[in-house]
Amino acid sequence: MLHEDCTAKLLDMEPMVLQKIENSANQIILHVEMRRRVSECPACRALTDQIHDYRICTVCDSPIHDKAVIWKYRKRRYRCPCCGKQFYEKNCFLPKWHRMTNRLALLGMNRLALKQSRKEVACTLHVSPSTVGRWLQLIDFGKPKSLPSVLSIDEFRGNTEYGKFQCILTAPKERRVLDILPTYRESDLYQYLRTFPDRRQVQYFVSDMRKEYISLARHLFHDASIVIDRFHVARYCTWAFENVRKRVQAKLSADQRKYFKRSRTLLLAKMHHLSAESKAAVERMLLFDRDLREAYLLKECFYQFMASQSSAEAKQRLHEFRLHAGVADIPEFTACLTMLRNWEPYILNAFDCPYTNGFTEGCNNTIKVLKRIAFGYRNFQNFRTRILLTFHAKEAPAS
């Protein structure tokens, strides 16, 4: 095999002829041309190999060893002897009228699927940030064709031209992102979801305690079990207990507060998870105030309720928690009790559903990272494309 053939094979450019290579500190310049072949006239479909002229084009290719790769491409133009049409040869690496190879654009799109800013991608590939932005606009994620059996919904702060908050739809069972919507308004969500013909196949609708989501589920997903994610339920109890702890600690003297140093983790932990030494420290802290003792017992009772294995067991333990809270009469737990009363049917459904909003919340964290890297997105379509590109790259199976 000739030396230039080996080089072309190494560079994955076998249809090309490498005439000369110039290597400098910052870039590699390849002087190339296509192998001469018989071509078909686009006008009359006649075959010809008559050459009309050559033109030198500058083309950007994928970098090698962190150096920009530039083609000095000797582009051949043919002439048809039948109709006189003049036309350029076809190049499998280069779309018509383009000055960047297909594989450079594909590499850029793959880089955009990573947690990198457009400027970082541009610097790595030795192109301009505006070029990377144009690549992003080439990607079109359409609307999903069907709904999953488990549908999860949540909002996140995006600050695009549509407002402060955007909406994410996920399929927790398959661990994939369905779509990103510009708003979380009930009317917009209704118009989006009502067009799906397979709404009856949704078995579980998982969300937080936002009345718009529950109303939407009741109107569109008649066969689905509406589930309030347990994380959003549990934090009402922890907020209430924290408010009691802060109130009690604020009244203590400086000497007494030493027992409460780094007490938050100890007091919020489940009692049976603590060591003997930690249990003794908790018991000393609970001696300071009656409300703190009652709040601690309420917290433990609530944890038992959250550990229920079925909705029937959860309903019984919830009743016990309410009785205990009524006797304790701690004002900080009023909001927790109101929440349980308002959302009880959907909270109990969570104990019969094996799925939560955990995957969706994890997606929101990734979205926050993408937004922080880009210093925010004002254009919703670019933001949506970047999010879906990132998650679809994660979902793609390994080759």
Image: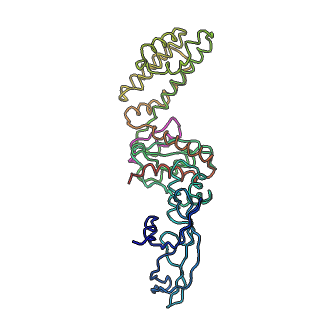
All told, the count of numbered labels is 0
Closest to the observer, 188 or 303: 303
* Image coords of residue 284 (percent x, y): 50, 9
Residue shown at the point (45%, 48%) measured from the top left: 394
Q: Is residue 252 above or below residue 55?
A: above
Q: Residue furthest front?
A: 3
Q: Quadrant of residue 25?
A: bottom right
Residue 141 located left or right of residue 198: right
Q: Residue furthest bottom?
A: 82
Closest to the observer, 369 or 243: 369
Asked if residue 149 can be seen in this view, the reply is: yes
Closest to the observer, 375 or 327: 375
Indicate the quadrant containing the N terminus: top left, top right, bottom left or bottom right.
Answer: bottom left
Q: Is residue 283 above or below residue 163?
A: above
* Image coords of residue 71 (percent x, y): 55, 69
Residue 85 located left or right of residue 152: right
Q: Is residue 119 magenta?
A: no
Asked if residue 333 can be seen in this view, the reply is: no
In this picture the colour scheme is rainbow
* Image coords of residue 327 (percent x, y): 49, 13
Residue shown at the point (41%, 30%) measured from the top left: 348
Q: Is residue 203 magenta?
A: yes
Indicate the quadrant containing the C terminus: top left, top right, bottom left or bottom right.
Answer: bottom left
Q: Is residue 157 above or below residue 307?
A: below
- Which residues are drawn in magenta? 200-218
Residue shown at the point (53%, 71%) measured from the top left: 20
* Image coords of residue 108 (percent x, y): 53, 57
Q: Quadrant of residue 158?
A: top right
